[in-house]
Image: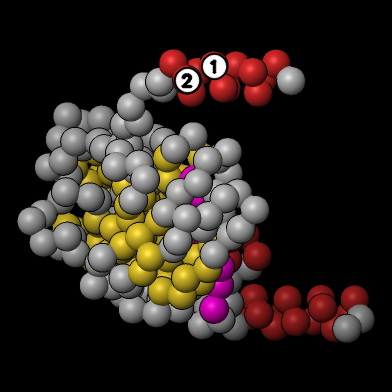
């Protein structure tokens, strides 16, 4: 396209009342919604899942990662769309045996080391609660979204979402007796910031202290 044609298109657009580039950028910015999620103590809640409907998403299958680091699942909460394949690498120097008995996706991965990264396909919406047969303290959640788009909040409890329909769906472990229950928040027209307070306390995995043998092993490993 020539410079003359581009100029002509801009003139025609302005003549017909179409938004300028600056106006389009403003529209795009206003279409974003900043969501802040707090716990019952008004503290920022990280890894809460915020979802919207009415937004376009890619139908292509994707891959996500649920790692195992320092005898912990990382991340604690993973939000994915349906038909996502999740890799389970083991970044520890010990073996883990990951499993889930959840209706959304029951599975069990035999003992494996950090040289392997099994994959599981999550083709049904719901919540998969993960555990490790070797380490009882390890627990995590895979949120297989039934919504158009789902994202998790950052360390400040915030996440930016595109504006979809008039409702937000917010989920966090222990939010309700039924694990899939969510808090639904109505967003007013023109609202650009929303704060959601959940009746929960922040959760995290709590590894037991290392034994004397484990401490000596790690010390020797670090000195090599």
Query: Does residue 126 appear in this view?
Result: no
Where 70 falls versus 178 (above or below)? above
Badge 2 marks a residue whose secondary structure is helix
What's the coloring here? secondary structure
In this view, the residue in front, 27 or 209, is 209
Where 80 falls versus 217 (above or below)? below
Q: Which mark is residue 9?
A: none
The N terminus lies in which quarter of the figure? bottom right
Q: CA distance from mark 1 to mark 2?
A: 5 Å
Residue at 45 percent across and 61 percent down: it is 110
On whether residue 153 falls in the magenta region, the answer is no
Q: Quadrant of residue 155?
A: top left
Q: Which mark is residue 213?
A: 2
The dominant secondary structure in magenta is strand
Q: Quadrant of residue 138?
A: top left
List x then y, in percent, for residue 58. Answer: 53, 78
List x then y, in percent, for residue 209. Answer: 36, 21
Residue at 54 percent across and 64 percent down: it is 118
**Quick one: label 2, few (<14), some, or many (20+) residues within 10 Å?**
few
In this view, the residue in front, 26 or 130, is 130
List x then y, in percent, for residue 42. Answer: 20, 31
Residue at 34 percent across and 50 percent down: it is 133
Query: Does residue 13 appear in this view?
Result: yes
Q: Which residue of the protein is positioned furthest toward the front in this rendering? A: 213
Residue at 65 percent across and 23 percent down: it is 221
Q: Which residue is mark 1?
A: 216
Badge 1 marks a residue whose secondary structure is helix
In this view, the residue in front, 213 or 45, is 213
Which residues lie in the magenta part?
A: 61-68
The reply to whether callout 1 and callout 2 are in contact (CB within 8 Å) is yes
Q: Quadrant of residue 124?
A: bottom left
């Amino acid at each position: 396209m020539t410079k003359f044609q581009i100029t002509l298109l801009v003139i025609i657009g302005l003549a017909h009342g179409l938004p300028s580039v600056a106006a389009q950028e403003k529209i795009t910015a206003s279409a974003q919604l900043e969501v802040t999620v707090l716990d019952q103590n008004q503290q920022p809640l990280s890894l809460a899942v915020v979802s919207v409907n009415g937004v376009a998403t890619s139908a292509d299958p994707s891959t996500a990662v649920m790692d195992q680091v320092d005898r912990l699942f990382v991340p604690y909460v993973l939000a994915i769309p349906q038909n996502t394949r999740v890799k389970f690498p083991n970044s520890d120097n010990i073996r883990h045996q990951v499993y889930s008995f959840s209706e959304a996706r029951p599975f069990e991965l035999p003992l494996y080391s950090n040289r392997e990264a099994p994959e599981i396909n999550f083709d049904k919406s719901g919540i998969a609660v993960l555990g490790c047969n070797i380490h009882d303290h390890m627990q995590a959640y895979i949120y297989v979204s039934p919504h158009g788009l789902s994202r998790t909040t950052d360390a400040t409890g915030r996440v930016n979402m595109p504006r979809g329909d008039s409702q937000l769906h917010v989920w966090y472990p222990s939010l309700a007796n039924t694990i899939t229950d969510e808090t639904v928040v109505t967003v007013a027209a023109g609202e650009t910031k929303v704060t959601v307070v959940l009746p929960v306390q922040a959760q995290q995995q709590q590894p037991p202290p290392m034994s004397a043998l484990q401490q000596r092993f790690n010390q020797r490993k670090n000195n090599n």
